[in-house]
């Protein structure tokens, strides 16, 4: 049996249609799962307003970022020293 150019085009178009259909089905499946499963692990962080119209979100990630930035600033002058965070508390 001999294959012609038309047979190749038909196989190519059929394959492309099947791939796009599979991707569309996958897209709708992911969207359906997203709507069925609600993200219960995320809480809205407590918001603190300051006098200068600055808004700070108070959560664990923000406190960790602040502690790491303080550590980086403390380490600027003496880079050969070793630091360890033992406690995080707010200084007013």
Image: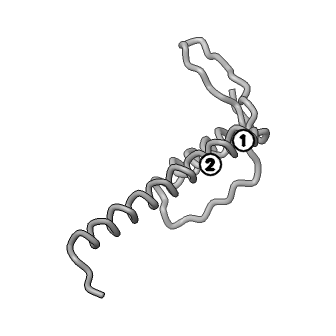
Categorize mark 1 by other alpha carbons within 10 Å: few (<14), some (14-19), many (20+).
Answer: few
Q: Residue at x 38, y 61 (%)?
A: 16
Q: Which mark is residue 30?
A: 2
Residue at point 67%, 42% (across, down) = 32
Residues packed near mark 2 inside 10 Å, few (<14), some (14 to 19) or many (20 plus): few
Residue 52 placement (x, y as % from top left) = 54, 13
- Tell me if 54 is positioned left or right of 14 in this view: right
The residue located at (28%, 72%) in the rendering is 7
* Residue visible at 58% across and 51% down in the picture: 71
Q: Is residue 70 left or right of residue 32?
A: left
Question: On the picture, is 92 further left or further right than 10?
Answer: right
**Does 53 appear above or below 23?**
above
User: In this orientation, which residue lies closer to the viewer: 65 or 91?
Assistant: 65
Question: SS class of the residue under badge 2?
Answer: helix
> Which disc, if any, is residue 69?
none
Q: Which residue is mark 1?
A: 60
Residue nearest the observer in this picture, 40 or 6: 6
Asked if the residue at tag 2 contacts the one at tag 1, i.e. Cβ–Cβ closer than 8 Å, the answer is no
For residue 7, above or below residue 52: below
Q: Is residue 16 above or below residue 90?
A: below
Measured from the top left, where is residue 1 in percent x and y?
A: 30, 87
Label 1: which secondary element: helix
Which residue appears farthest toward the front when viewing the image?
A: 1
Quarter of the figure that contains the C terminus: top right
Q: Residue furthest left?
A: 5
Point out the tag, 1 or 2, that comes first from the N-terminus. Answer: 2
Q: CA distance from mark 1 to mark 2?
A: 30 Å
Residue 38 or 31: which is nearer the viewer? 31
Up/down of 33 relative to 52, above or below: below
Which mark lies nearer to you, 1 or 2?
2
Q: Quadrant of residue 28?
A: top right
- Where residue 50 sits in the image (x, y, percent)? 62, 16
């Amino acid at each position: 049996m001999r294959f012609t150019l038309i047979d190749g085009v038909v196989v190519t178009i059929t394959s492309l249609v099947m791939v796009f259909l599979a991707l569309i089905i996958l897209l709708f499946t992911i969207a359906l799962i997203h709507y069925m499963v609600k993200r219960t692990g995320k809480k809205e962080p407590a918001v603190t307003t300051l006098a200068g119209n600055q808004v700070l979100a108070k959560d664990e990630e923000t406190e960790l970022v602040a502690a790491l930035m303080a550590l980086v600033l403390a380490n600027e002058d003496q880079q050969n020293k070793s630091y360890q965070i033992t406690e995080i508390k707010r200084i007013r």
